[in-house]
Image (spheres, rainbow, N blue to C red):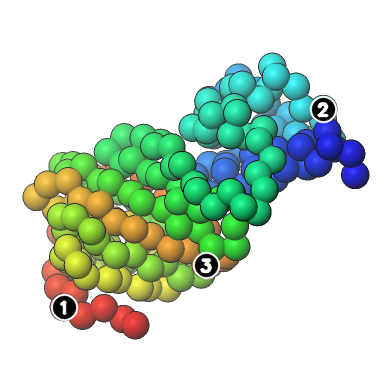
Amino acid sequence: MGEMQEIERVVRTRLRSLRTTLGLSLDEVASRTNLSASTISRIETGHRTISLDVLVPLARALHVDLDALLEVRHDDDVVIRPVAASDGDTTTWVLSRPTSTTVAVKMRFEPSGRVPEQRVHPGHDWFFVIEGRVRLLLGDREVLVESGEVAEFATMTPHAITAVDGPAEVIMLFDRDGHRVHVHHEVAAAPRRRSSLSAARS
């Protein structure tokens, strides 16, 4: 495989991995780029030529520098330089490479008068609260997770996370089935049962 073919292969893989890691559908990326969903799909699958007129808006929509998108890293480059991506009250830093088998992110939640829509997807989520405290919504339950505590749960249960009393930051790990980072859509809050998480699952 030639150098240009290798770069194209890496770029296509990164584009799709970044999109799915950020939890964006083809239609959502299309709305941010003025490209059609079918065009983006053909780019990801290698059925359309990659050019700057599509790479620039895609990089902007996926919150990644164009240089980082095009760079072919060597195995000795172990430093990852996360880029913040904001969406409403949530800021996300992807801590792992797009092609990594483990997906790690840092998320900062700002307090809001509304609660995020609960989502489901296959797999398990694990997160560690490094600052503040969060409310983990699991179906009709509310679990308060304090700074220094860990939560782990099956993601086929509807779930969402929101900050409590002030900003909160968490580190999240996802298995391959649960790699989508949650993009929260605000919905009206409803009364829920409360409980506290006093111990982490190992």
User: Which residue is farthest front?
Assistant: 76
The vertical placement of 83 against 146, above or below, is above
Residue, x 12% and y 47% (percent of image)?
A: 166
Q: Which residue is mark 1?
A: 198
The vertical placement of 49 against 11, above or below, is above
Identify the element where label 1 is drawn.
loop
Q: Quadrant of residue 51?
A: top right
The vertical placement of 30 against 196, above or below, is above
Q: Which residue is mark 3?
A: 175
Residue toward you, 29 or 95:
95
Identify the element where label 3 is drawn.
loop
Mark-to-mark CA distance, 2 and 3: 32 Å
Q: Are marks 1 and 2 in contact (CB under 8 Å)?
A: no
Q: Quadrant of residue 18?
A: top right
Residue 78 at x, y percent in the picture? 54, 52
User: Which residue is farthest bottom?
Assistant: 202
The vertical placement of 91 against 107, above or below, is above
